[in-house]
Image (spheres, rainbow, N blue to C red):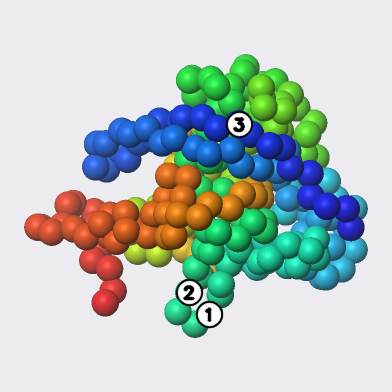
Amino acid sequence: MATLDLRILPAGEVELHDERRRRRWSVELEPFEIGVVPITKAEYAQGMGTGESIARSPAVDLSWFDAVMFCNAASVRDGLAPVYLVNKEGVTWQTEVSGYRLPTEAEWEYACRAGTTGPHYGPLAHIAWTAEDEVEELQAVGSKEPNLFGLYDTLGNAWEWCWDLLDPARYGDYRVFRGGGFADKRWSVRASTRRGGGPGMKHPDVGMRVAKGAFHTGQAAQGWSAEADIERGVFSGPLPSGWTPLAE
């Protein structure tokens, strides 16, 4: 199998938001690499040794854990050190290691926007497979127009797992996925839309895109930090309406 097709993105800045906490902030990013297209069914099957496939549509029905394991397997195959340390305590991102990994939320949004500031980086009908196309299944990657970074399908077709926690105070270990899918309405297929699920959950429209880049910064890199995860997981006072207390 050929090495995964990644594009080097320059250093830059992206603005993120946390709607629940009504907070906006800017993240400065170092250069990194990211997949030109999402991981396809063919790439996933070959990378994980699960059989042969020629499908060029995004690999979906992947849990966040599946995505992590694919990154490690693909790294080994391509002669790179695996980024993720996986054990019974969970998954640790070894930020100084340069194998394949999931993008952080900041990296994903920066890559998706490609310098634009609106909800879409172009006319949605031209760049993304959505409910407006009235298709009933995933479509071949790269069959609509790319953004200004030359990346395809960052919006529409399939949602994509990121490294980050969604909202640990409310959802515990749920991880983020971004981008919208082929069956989603316009309002869901936006560069800023955040969704998420448990790391072991599988969804028929959630896949992945790999990133690459090492940072000698300990447990913090590219807009994410373990310390911030702990801080975001703390909530004091009465629970807001609709919240369910997390299990101890």
Q: Secondary structure at mark 3?
A: loop
| Residue sitting at x 53%, y 52% | 215
Q: In the picture provided, is 86 more to the left or to the right than 248?
A: right
Q: Position of residue 85 (x, y in %)?
A: 56, 72
Residues tagged 3 and 1 counted as in contact (Cβ below 8 A): no
Q: Is residue 170 above or below residue 88?
A: above
Please state which amino acid type lies under the numbered disc 1: Asn
Q: Secondary structure at mark 2?
A: strand
| Residue sitting at x 33%, y 34% | 25
Q: In the picture provided, is 80 more to the left or to the right than 95?
A: right
Q: Nearer the viewer, mark 3 or mark 1?
A: 3
Q: Nearer the viewer, mark 3 or mark 2?
A: 3
Please state which amino acid type lies under the numbered disc 2: Gly
Q: Earlier in the sequence, mark 3 or mark 1?
A: 3
Mark 3 is surrounded, within 10 Å at the Cα level, by few (under 14), some (14 to 19) or many (20 or more) other residues, namely few
Q: Position of residue 169 (x, y in %)?
A: 27, 58
Farthest residue, direction front: 216
Q: Which mark is residue 90?
A: 2
Q: Read off the residue under disc 3.
A: 10
Q: Nearer the viewer, residue 137 or 65?
A: 65
Q: In the picture provided, is 245 more to the left or to the right than 139?
A: left
Q: Position of residue 18 (x, y in %)?
A: 32, 40
Q: CA distance from mark 3 to mark 2?
A: 31 Å
Q: Which mark is residue 87?
A: 1
Q: Secondary structure at mark 1?
A: strand
Residues tagged 1 and 2 counted as in contact (Cβ below 8 A): yes
Mark 1 is surrounded, within 10 Å at the Cα level, by few (under 14), some (14 to 19) or many (20 or more) other residues, namely few
Q: Earlier in the sequence, mark 3 or mark 2?
A: 3
